[in-house]
Amino acid sequence: MSEASPEPKAFVLFSAGPAQRFIAAARTVRDLWTGSFLLSWLTRHAMEPIMQRCGPEAFVLPDMSRDPMPLNGAAGKPGAGSGFPLRVACLPNRFLAEVPETKAEELARQCQESFKEAWQEIVRAVREELEAQIGRSSLAAPWQEAVQRLWQAQVDSFFDDQDLRVVVLPWKDFSQQDLDKLLGPDTASSSASPAARLWRDRMQMTFRLLAAQKAIRKVTQYQPPADPLGMYGPKCTLLGTYEQIGPAEVSESARFWEEFAERIKVGGIRFRRGERLCAPSLVKRFAWPAYLAPRFGKWPRELWFEDTATAAAKEWLQEPPALDPQDIREQYGDWNGQWLHWNRPDQDPDDPCPKKIWYGDQEKGWEGLCSILKKKRDAQGRAPTYYAILMLDGDRMGERLNECVGSEAVRRVSQTLARFALEHAQKIVEQYLGTLIYCGGDDLLALAPTSRVLGCALEVQREFRQVWQGANLPCSEATLSAGIAIVHYKEDLRFALDQARQAEKQAKNAGRDILCITLCRRSGEHQTALCPWPFVETVQGWVHAFLPKQDPSGSKIPGASDRWAYHLYQELPVLEGLPLEAIQAELRRQMDRAEEGTRKRLFAAGYKQAGDQLVQQFQEYYQAMLPRFSKDPQNKILRHFLVLCQMASFLARRREE
């Protein structure tokens, strides 16, 4: 749609929330993916009224010329035969469209209604499936009582009008003179046309109006009624603002959910013991088998997501002798990454799955798997127990958009972001044995093995820059800030996501365009270090040096020792009080006294000057980090550098010894 069209126009800006709360309320990787996918799916439904009446060209952000989530594919299945990226959520939770002014208010209302209708359709499908399985069992009476009292109130309040925000900005109501007063001095290029500057300022005003709406604190309308005895039930174990769907009395609730876990299994997705879920959490858990799978023709077993234990061991599983979890699933009926660390089928009393698989008709199943796992452990040692969560986000993307004057310039940015999300992100993450959960263009969420995550982050950052530069966009170069959380597979996934989010936030606070890594040891010790993008390759080299290798005969060659890094970190309280020259001298001394094999693994042909090379790496890191610290820069930089040295060893070990 041309900005020069004589027909009066308006902007419609839609934003759906609460995005983080919905996505991060996850106990499993499938929960995490489902939350991201559902939010993209619902946002795509919100787009549909504009798509039908104005076409894909109406959308400014994101680019919809290549619809990443077509609702009507071949054979009546959403996206069938159209390259639909089932494993990746690829639409952000907001969009900006340019529509005729006469239709703007109506379209804005229809966008909200379409989102809500799609949500309610999913809600109904899950509820019907659960009630069909509950049937006339002993669960039926307490289920119906809780559902009638809580279900609809919870799902209606989760995505209400305060969460689905829409801004309509008629162009005729905002002249350039008005916008100059509201937005401040014009910083647009003098070569830009007045019409292009006016279009840009109207877009900027639209986003500011949305920001003003979000600044108003939400007052929830959800007020749960008590049960017939005047009691209120325990809270949901995933979304603590809602009550669980079950009896309010604690002992009755425990019995209800224990039977629920044993009885309910939808499309192969089980319910874990100890879980007590509210209506939104139940919808999220079972949305794929109850609603999406019949529409896509892909059932959970076909679209399998590994658990965190498998994500941690993914590289280990591929090393010879290779072990494919998919083969185990086909041969034995299921796979659980925790089995890599078990010695008997009933080791975890909270997981009923092994008892059903390894007993009964397949009594020898566990012995067969134990034999396979024993070969792996004898050849490689125990399986890794830590994995990495990677979050990346574009820096000051709002400013980059404001530098683009006019519709065509902004649309080129939108197309570039869509190209990166659809053509590059998933390939890069899978190349490093990772699992991509979400990529909306300038933001990404993925899981990866610890020894591969640095390479993955660096490759994403480089590819993003290349795609951006190759587009020759009329704005400043975009940069990425990233956070990595290294966590044990047994850690609560919500905690792990929060640690990755906090690491990303720390990268932003440190001046942006940098990587922040947080290591959360199971013992309770947490360490955080900043790493400039140009230095990531150096740290990655340390990781490779610490990794054990195999010679051509198959013999195992141990990796470099990390004793030098340990000694330096132990000396940190003393080193922080020394001049820079003395610090460098101690770095040189500790490295030069390391074993020859360690120095060779770290510095190859230059191992005889290993101490000097470590000092040179420190100097490179020091110069890159110096502008980021205004107070006590030397001690802070030294601490981050030594933490990175220790982290590199941990990333290679992939477990605590």
Image (spheres, rainbow, N blue to C red):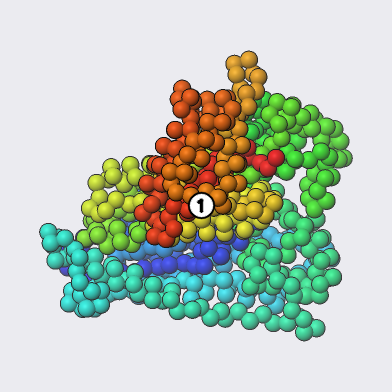
Q: Is residue 536 visible?
A: no
Residue 631: quarter of image: bottom left
Q: Is residue 216 visible?
A: yes
The answer to whether residue 64 is left or right of residue 653 is left
Which residue sits at x=23%, y=56%? Answer: 408
Which residue is situated farthest in the top direction here?
553
Q: Is residue 355 above or below residue 323?
A: below
Along the line of sight, which residue is nearer the eye, 544 or 398?
A: 544
Q: Position of residue 417 (x, y in %)?
A: 36, 50
Q: How many marks?
A: 1
Write down the residue under mark 1: 576
For the residue labelled by badge 1, is the local secondary structure a helix, a strand or a loop?
loop
Q: Is residue 112 above or below residue 532?
A: below
Q: Position of residue 185 (x, y in %)?
A: 20, 72
Along the line of sight, which residue is nearer the eye, 527 or 394?
A: 527
The answer to whether residue 116 is left or right of residue 419 is right
Along the line of sight, which residue is nearer the eye, 15 or 385?
A: 385
Instruction: Mark 1: give few (<14), some (14-19) or many (20+) Cα within 10 Å.
Output: some
Given the image, on which type of amino acid does mark 1 rest? Glu
Q: Quadrant of the C terminus?
A: top right
Q: Is residue 244 above or below residue 624?
A: below
The answer to whether residue 271 is left or right of residue 167 is right
Which residue is situated farthest in the bottom direction here?
230
Which residue sits at x=57%, y=40%? Answer: 565
Which residue sits at x=35%, y=74%? Answer: 209
The answer to whether residue 5 is left or right of residue 319 is left
Q: Position of residue 267 (x, y in %)?
A: 68, 50
Which residue sits at x=59%, y=27%? Answer: 595
Q: Quadrant of the N terminus?
A: bottom left
